[in-house]
Amino acid sequence: MGLTIGVDIGGTKIAAGVVDEDGNILATCKVPTPPTPEGVIDAIADAVRTVSADHDVEAVGIGAAGYVDDKRATVLFAPNINWRHEALKDKVEQRVGLPVVVENDANAAAWGEYRFGAGQGHDDVICITLGTGLGGGIIIGNKLRRGRFGVAAEFGHIRVVPDGLLCGCGSQGCWEQYASGRALVRYAKQRANATPENAEILLGLGDGTVEGIEGKHISAAARQGDPVAIDSFRELARWAGAGLADLASLFDPSAFIVGGGVSDEGDLVLDPIRKSFKRWLIGGQWRPHAQVLAAKLGGKAGLVGAADLARQG
């Protein structure tokens, strides 16, 4: 199969792109994410028509945040879009006249990194995305492993603290409450409130108040040596690395690929994640260690991965 289209559905925008078999994006467009479930489907179709106008495309892959069924056709549950058993494949196919494959967005991003990014050269890779929440994907034996019902690799909702912090999923103590962009902001606010004298740079980048601290401020402050910002990244990394050690016990991959907005800070966050991973890896002094690698494709991973999964049918 030649050219395919990848679609990445975000909370504020929908991105679509024509992708060739080498993972190169030939044309793209972005449209705002509509507020209604049916509006999102129409927007996807409009984006597909726009990018395919000057290209002969053969299929469409869609990355959606939520549970996707084992047939890669129906979104069982997507909290941010309010989809419940949404027949996304059929509805988009009817509108665009092309074969459609639907995949969880974190799975699509993992596949993109495995095929065209940091995972090249590895047969067994576990990907995690440290964004607002925490997502993931499993590639074992060169295959994307989705589980019997299609909803595997929801790593963010592994409970790491019994009766811990309330998660948006309704459970308590989920991993993403301790290792995510949202967690990073919480750590920084707690520390800045406790020791504002150690957060002068951080507070100065915002509006001067603890409540005004945002993720971008923490990143910038850490690069300038702000103690609270640096310590907040270390706390996130401690939880992230410990979680990777648990995943190593489950899957024994040759590499972990860390993507998402938090990972854009590079070694500022990856080095302490590696140290935490080494610290918590059971039998670590006697066994081989998986590499912990930074994702390479950035925000393009989901789009490229979805397009490639569509190519493979």
Image (cartoon, rainbow, N blue to C red):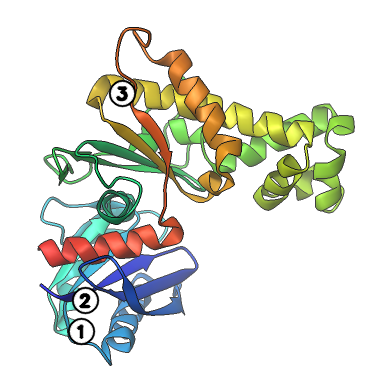
Is label 3 in a helix, a strand or a loop? helix
Few, some or many C-alpha atoms within 10 Å of disc 1 (few <14, some 14-19, many ≥20)?
some
Identity of the residue drawn at 75% across and 30% down: 191
Asked which quadrant contains residue 101, the reply is bottom left
Q: Is residue 74 left or right of residue 238?
A: left
The residues bearing labels 1 and 3 have C-alpha atoms spaced at a distance of 43 Å
Dot 1 amino acid type? Arg
Q: Residue furthest right?
A: 197
Q: Nearer the viewer, residue 106 or 120?
A: 120
Identity of the residue drawn at 41% across and 38% down: 293
Question: Do the residues bearing badges 2 and 1 touch, measured as CB atoms within 8 Å?
Answer: yes
Is label 2 in a helix, a strand or a loop? helix
Is label 1 in a helix, a strand or a loop? helix
Few, some or many C-alpha atoms within 10 Å of disc 3 (few <14, some 14-19, many ≥20)?
many
Residue 189 in the image: state x and y as whole percent: 73, 37
Residue at mark 1: 95
Dot 2 amino acid type? Val
Q: Which mark, residue 248?
A: 3
Quick check: can you spot residue 96?
A: yes
The residues bearing labels 2 and 1 have C-alpha atoms spaced at a distance of 5 Å
Tell me the quadrant of the picture where the N terminus can be found.
Answer: bottom left
Tell me the quadrant of the picture where the C terminus can be found.
Answer: bottom left
Few, some or many C-alpha atoms within 10 Å of disc 2 (few <14, some 14-19, many ≥20)?
many
Q: Which mark, residue 186?
A: none
Q: Which mark, residue 92?
A: 2
Question: Do the residues bearing badges 2 and 3 touch, measured as CB atoms within 8 Å?
Answer: no
Counting residues from the start of the chain, the first of labels 1 and 3 encountered is: 1
Residue 296 in the image: state x and y as whole percent: 42, 52
Q: Nearer the viewer, residue 125 or 10?
A: 125
Dot 3 amino acid type? Ala
